[in-house]
Amino acid sequence: MTDISSNQQIHLQSLPQVEEMDLQSLSPRYRVLNIQISLILWGALALISAIVHWQPLFELSSTVADVSFFATFCLIFISISGATYHFFADPKKQYAIREHDVHFHSGLFFRRLVSQPIMRIQHIEIARGPIERSAGLATLQVYSAGGANHAFQIPGLVHEQAIQLRQYILDHKDVKENG
Amino acid sequence: MDELNKALNDGNELGQDLELNSASDEWQRLSPISILYFTVRSLFLIANNFIYLVPIVAVNFSTFKDQPLLVVFIVLALLMVLALIGFLQFLFYRFRVQGQRVEIKQGVIKKSHIDLPFERIQNVKLEQPLYYRFNNFACVELDTAGSAKQEAKIIALKMDLAQAFRKTVIETNYENKLNEEQGNEGQVESASSAPAVNEVELNRRSMKDLVIHGVSNNRVWIFLGALAPFYASISDALSQLFVSIGFDVEAYFSIQTLAWWEFALHVLSLAMLLMLIIVLFSVVGSILMFYGYTLCKSDDRYIRRSGLLTKQEVSMKQSRIQLMVQQQDWLDILLKRVNLYFEQNKTGSVNQNQPGQHLANKLLVPSVTPQESAELMHDVMPEQALPSQNFAAISKRFILKNAALFALPLAGLIGATLQHKNDWGWLAGLGIFAFFIAIITLRWWRWGYSFDSDFAYIRKGFLGVNYYCFPINKVQQIHFKQNSFMRPYKLATLRVVLASGALSVPYMDEYIVRKQINRVLDVLVSDKRSWM
């Protein structure tokens, strides 16, 4: 969170351009977690499908046998490609906080940089599902008048960091005045 | 408040049956006419939700025909139940206006209590259904700025009371704003010197304009929505009509007995006939919705009044307008007309799923001339200069990408399928490909963007053309997007989120996108004006 306090000293003219911002990485646990989910969840489904296909207990009808055979390989493919995708794509997810705006960069094939002026923020939420909680992670959700479809999100933050970030935004004078 | 109480008192002096006076801290009951409103509302609700019962009714039509008394009885019973529900709703409905806030208690089984401070009211909309016209009542709909899901409506007020109420809410908000701005220096203006609510008429639509609007814009849905419950009986009646006049539909469209040109002629004439009917209905829909259209300005508010059966009055605060859209379909271009939309905050409006309600966050000026449109736009945002913009084109790679990704595979597939049956299939495929390319090129040609010191302008369209214009300081969020196809050529998509929705321009120069994002963010650092 050092960037916040140091950023406050910077004059407007010398603010870095959006393309030159120093982007922060998400928690490394985020990538590990996503890869695990992909491998375990889809892997478990593949395993179930494989067990159905190869179990010796009873004879399967030819349709069920074909479907379960096909499904096993599809699920294995989804599991591995999902894990591979997260391995390469998650490090591309980065964020930056400047004095007056927050930014989130993402995308392996479709790159996207979302910039949210702090002045336009209406409310902030920290969302944590059970899996995120178990890993000590949190997602920061920021809403503007653009509506829920355009909620600004930073996933994979360490929980304390998300709380700090929320507090920084809440303490921002533009949010106090307009929010 | 004094204003309202005075108006309310005046109302009483006029011998109105509403017991609203200065002691309006008392909970008020509506006029009994509201029972009619509640009943009609539930009737519409049932009609909307039970459209899928129509086939059952149609199937059992003969049973009903044999026992007309039963039908009458059922209908009467239904109406009585609805009237009873309406009466209960009336009985449980209470409202009061007290110290700059409106409170509404309603609900028979599921009770609700709405407590709405004036400053949270974004719009006051007056609605006058046909059956309120005779004794001059109006339904006051309160649009809240928040994400209120429940509807705040004062179901029945006398028209002049409703207008006084609207005026009070608007003026209170205006005074509050003035006080905020000047309050600290002790220059608070007294309530009596509040701005005069002098309305200036900006635009009026004649019957001719509405007919043009109906022809060039498909307003059929207004009509189709109203007719939906009767589709089955209409088609039955039509087929019976054809039989009775001796018109054989099957013979008319029999491809076996007719020459191909005869068949084509028959299809064409049917299409023309259908088009004519649709256009007629569309014109009727346009007149239903926009009859007696006036756009007025009162201080910083725009007020739209229109409607043939149900008169509507929608007002929109100037500062809340996020985006102006000048829309022209190909027919509009031929007729030299423009539909002008002023769009405001989308999140606050309720009833989005009701027919026609998608216009709730928009103020439409139907089929004005380009000259009138330019004048109105200038009135809303005087600094914008849409007419004098030179739009920059997007990259031609837009054509290439769409050709490679959509046109080629699709045309290839169709061509290959036809080639399978016919030796000339590849020619058809080529023709289709050329057609797609023409469409994509037209689309590319319409895309354009331009920026000046305070505003951004976007042009897009296909056969028609739309112009979008918004002040940069109202941007809520801004995106830089780039896919693998764009990256090597330094192209990117700019996406801007406004409170009224998002706008994108694809295949712009990456450098320009970044420059504009930096500029917008810089503007928002120094320009602290509210977007509302």
Image: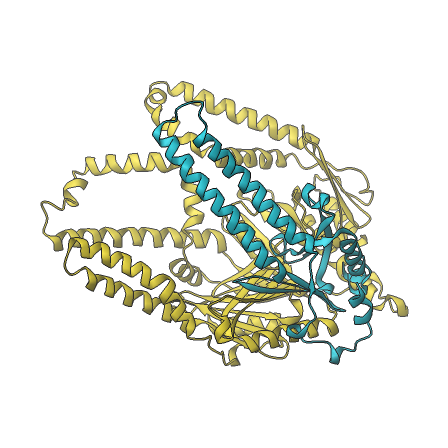
Chain colours: A cyan, B yellow
Whole-percent x, y for residue A77 in the image? 47, 47
Q: Is residue B402 above or below residue B158?
A: below
Q: Residue furthest right?
A: B186
Residue B285 higher or lower than B203, as above or below: above
Q: Position of residue B378 (x, y in %)?
A: 58, 74
Q: Residue at x 20, y 55 (%)?
A: B418
Q: On the picture, is B19 further left or further right than B131? A: right
Q: Is residue A112 above or below residue A17?
A: above
**x, y (%) of residue B17?**
70, 39
Q: Nearer the viewer, residue B110 or B234?
A: B110
Q: Is residue A106 above or below residue A42?
A: below
Coordinates of residue B191 in the picture (x, y in percent): 82, 61
Position of A106 with respect to B528 (left or right) is left
Query: In which quadrant of the rendered image does the N terminus of chain A lie?
Result: bottom right
- Considering depth in this image, is B339 or B412 the residue closer to the camera? B412
Q: Look at the image and tell me whether residue B472 can be seen.
A: yes
State the residue at coordinates (60%, 49%).
A35
In this view, the residue farthest toward the front is A56
In the image, taking residue B14 as reference, residue B80 lies left or right, namely left
In the image, B498 versus A3, the foreground residue is A3
Nearest the viewer among B120 and B526 is B526
Q: Quadrant of the C terminus of chain A?
A: bottom right
How many badges with numbers are in the image?
0
